[in-house]
Image (spheres, helix red, strand yellow):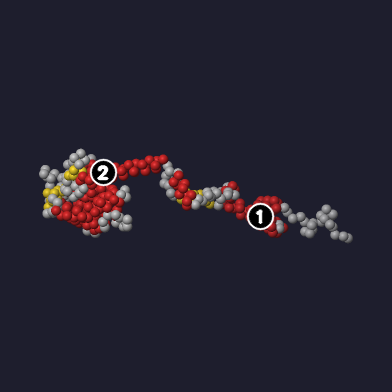
């Protein structure tokens, strides 16, 4: 008796002639039946690996978590992890196309050619402001160099602020910001040669005006020139030393006062101070000296400037107030403005 050649020859179930199940049948039975082991044994190695790959991809698409930024309860910046599927299209998404890279020369060429109109307008305005400053400085230097102010109609100088060359000092930091080296050199040279003698010999000056213009101007010049190797004026220490000398004399307005409110005027050469003719003190003047004196204490390490000036603000807190307003003599607005500057 010969052996059958196929299953069709006889009704005989022999593993030698048994058909192996198709891949789709294996997947279906694996998912919906418990006959996993027997079907996988019958499946070829390649089909089994393909099955594992499909299961893995399905798992990733169903369970992968992606971190995203969300806004929770109106507060931006909190992170949360939201569970969600990644679409099949996202898995097949191509990486973003990078823009072509330009050479440094091409980048510079593009930047020069693509200038926004408003930038051109700003540059024109900047040049106009610089020209106006140079025009004013040229007139002052020609007719009133060393004076506090220039009287443009009569073309002469006047020393209404004590004769310390207020315009020279007050304009110096502006010239530094504008990078006008010639003006910086001229103003700095004048300060180095003339200001020390004037501080020691001049008479009466107003505490407020001298502090904000001369002391403030010197401290600003020191701040802008310190650590700047391209500085065209004298050494930065020249500005700081003059500011300290002047502030030491102005402190007399605080120490000679019977209250914490400083006297309004100081005589520089003999270091004396006196009140205004009516005996009143301006709130806006007495309470706007802290910015310069605090910074001078920071630079010198000597707290006396800050201590004396801050006593004024501490006293202001104790004064009776009407709807939050402190008592004033004149120009309450400056008190508020400078008080905010000190806080900042």
Mark 1 Cα shell of 10 Å, populated few (<14), some (14-19), many (≥20): some
Camera-side mark, 1 or 2: 2
Which element is circle 2 on?
helix
Can residue 291 be seen here? no
Residue in the picture at 20% in, 46% down: 144
Mark 2 Cα shell of 10 Å, populated few (<14), some (14-19), many (≥20): few
Residue in the picture at 69% in, 56% down: 47
Q: CA distance from mark 1 to mark 2?
A: 87 Å
Q: Position of residue 36 (x, y in %)?
A: 67, 56
Q: Position of residue 299 (x, y in %)?
A: 25, 57
Q: Position of residue 85 (x, y in %)?
A: 56, 48
Q: Is residue 94 left or right of residue 119?
A: right
Pointers 1 and 2 in contact (C-beta within 8 Å): no
Residue in the picture at 24% in, 51% down: 187
Which element is circle 1 on?
helix
Find the residue positioned furthest to the front. 142
Can residue 101 be seen here? yes
The residue where tag 1 is placed is: 51
Name the residue nearer the viewer: 184 or 38: 184
Q: Is residue 41 left or right of residue 184?
A: right
The residue where tag 2 is placed is: 136
Q: Is residue 52 left or right of residue 251?
A: right
Dot 1 or dot 2, earlier in sequence: 1
Quarter of the image for residue 301 reads bottom left
Find the residue positioned furthest to the right. 1
Image quarter of the N terminus: bottom right
| Label disc, if present, on residue 313 of the rendered structure | none
Name the residue nearer the viewer: 42 or 337: 337
Q: Position of residue 45 (x, y in %)?
A: 69, 59
Residue in the picture at 37% in, 43% down: 123
């Amino acid at each position: 008796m010969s052996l059958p050649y196929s299953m069709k020859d006889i009704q005989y179930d022999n593993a030698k002639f048994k058909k192996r199940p198709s891949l789709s049948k294996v997947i279906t039975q694996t998912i919906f039946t418990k006959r996993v082991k027997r079907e996988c044994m019958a499946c070829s190695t390649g089909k089994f690996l393909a099955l594992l790959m499909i299961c893995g991809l399905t798992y990733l698409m169903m369970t992968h978590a992606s971190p995203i930024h969300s806004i929770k309860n109106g507060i931006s910046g909190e992170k949360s992890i939201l569970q969600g599927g990644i679409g099949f299209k996202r898995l097949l998404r191509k990486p973003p196309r990078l823009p072509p890279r330009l050479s440094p020369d091409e980048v510079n060429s593009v930047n020069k050619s693509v200038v926004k109109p408003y930038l051109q307008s700003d540059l024109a305005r900047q040049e106009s402001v610089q020209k106006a400053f140079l025009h004013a400085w040229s007139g002052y230097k020609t007719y009133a160099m060393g004076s506090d102010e220039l009287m443009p109609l009569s073309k002469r100088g006047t020393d209404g602020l004590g004769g310390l060359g207020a315009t020279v000092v007050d304009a110096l930091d502006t010239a530094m910001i504008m990078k006008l080296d010639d003006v910086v050199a001229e103003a700095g040279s004048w300060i180095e040669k003339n200001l020390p003698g004037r501080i020691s010999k001049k008479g009466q000056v107003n505490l407020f005006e001298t502090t904000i213009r001369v002391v403030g101007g010197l401290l600003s010049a020191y701040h802008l020139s310190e650590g700047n190797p391209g500085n065209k004026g004298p050494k930065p220490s020249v500005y700081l030393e003059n500011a300290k000398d002047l502030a030491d004399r102005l402190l007399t307005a605080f120490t000679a006062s019977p209250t914490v409110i400083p006297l309004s005027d100081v005589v520089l050469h003999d270091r004396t101070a006196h009140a205004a003719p009516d005996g009143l003190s301006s709130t806006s003047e007495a309470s706007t000296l802290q910015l310069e004196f605090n910074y001078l204490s920071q630079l010198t390490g000597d707290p006396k400037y800050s201590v004396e000036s801050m006593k004024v603000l501490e006293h202001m807190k104790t004064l009776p107030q009407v709807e939050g307003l402190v008592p004033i003599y004149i120009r309450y607005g400056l008190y508020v403005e400078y008080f905010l500057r000190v806080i900042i």
